[in-house]
Amino acid sequence: MLNHTDKVLSHFERVAYMPVFIVGLFFNVTALCIFCRLKRWTDTHIYMFNLLVADFLAIIFLPFRILEAFCPIKPSELCTFLLCTQYSNMYSSIFTITAISVHRFIAVRFPFLTKAQASKSKMIATSTCIFIWTIIVVICACNYEDLNPDKLQTCYDRKLTKKLKQHFFLLLQILGYLIPVLIVILCCTQAIYILIRSLKHVQGREKVERKNIAAIINANLFTFIVCFTPVHIGLLLQYVVSDDSGNDFVHVFLDVAEWIATTNCCLDSIGYYFLLKRVNKRDNRSY
């Protein structure tokens, strides 16, 4: 029997996830078509395609989350797989965006070196993307039992009484969020500072373009923090709260935070694939 909180969350998920699925599917399919028409790939395209793969996987499995809101799915091996997929897609996005931020900072800080090492940069980008997925698969395989059906309250919610193992929790919080967010903040703020400082040395179209790039970097930084910070706060609350009085709050907070993280699938498509493509018109230059 569902309590009042569960009913409210069920209605929220029915309303909230459907637009994310429709918009995300449209933009990701459109982005995929753009990639299929590319004649020449740069290292930036490789990173963005990896981000597209992560977002697309999240989108195609999202109907299960919507189905769960209308018709609860009994915890099973399918639910374990769906949770693993959810975590994998989220952290693949986090790690890829982190790699893009580092790459973009290097491109802004050392533009001539970046052009001179174009072929090597593509190899580095490919290797980085393969490494990201390898790390994620290994982490999921090693911690698979933390998402077993007997530890699930519903198909997408763990029992609050079944805490994540300490090493898995610390792995998600430190390697999965704290280190990436610090790198992203550092790289983005430095890149913006360099671009703004260089505006006095350029005029006309070049000046407008650099302003646009700085604005996009700032928007990407804001989106990263907004999308991925709440869900990791929720995981922290889930790990530390032990009394029943706080369970409802944690349940609601984590559910909403997971939805916010899912919206990143739409924002990536708009922010990275279309805005960057619009300002990146000269020789497929990477940022």
Image (spheres, rainbow, N blue to C red):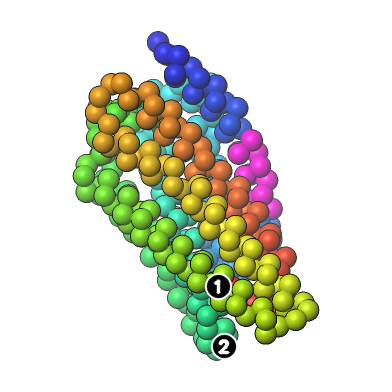
Assign the C terminus to one quadrant of the image. Answer: bottom right
Who's the residue at 27% across and 37% down the image? 239
Badge 1 marks a residue whose secondary structure is: helix
Percent x, y of residue 9: 49, 23
- Residue 245 relative to residue 229: left or right: left
Task: Give whichever of 50, 90 is nearer the camera.
Answer: 90
Report x, y in % for residue 143: 26, 45
| Amino acid on which the number 1 mark rests in the picture | Tyr
Residue 215 rendering spot, x and y as whole percentages: 64, 63
Labelled disc at residue 193:
1
- SS for tag 2? helix
Q: Is residue 251 magenta?
A: no
| Image quadrant assignment for residue 19 | top right
Write down the residue under mark 2: 112
Mark 2, Cα crowd under 10 Å, few <14 / some 14-19 / many 20+, is few
Label annotation for residue 226: none
Vertically, is 259 above or below 176? above
**What is the CA distance from the residue labelled 1 to the residue labelled 2?**
18 Å
Task: State which region is magenta.
Answer: 19-30
Q: Is residue 220 visible?
A: yes
Give the residue at x 72% y 65%. Answer: 278
In screen coordinates, is 207 left or right of 107?
right
Q: Dividing the picture into quarters, in which one does residue 270 lie?
A: bottom right
Q: Is residue 25 magenta?
A: yes
Q: Is residue 32 visible?
A: no
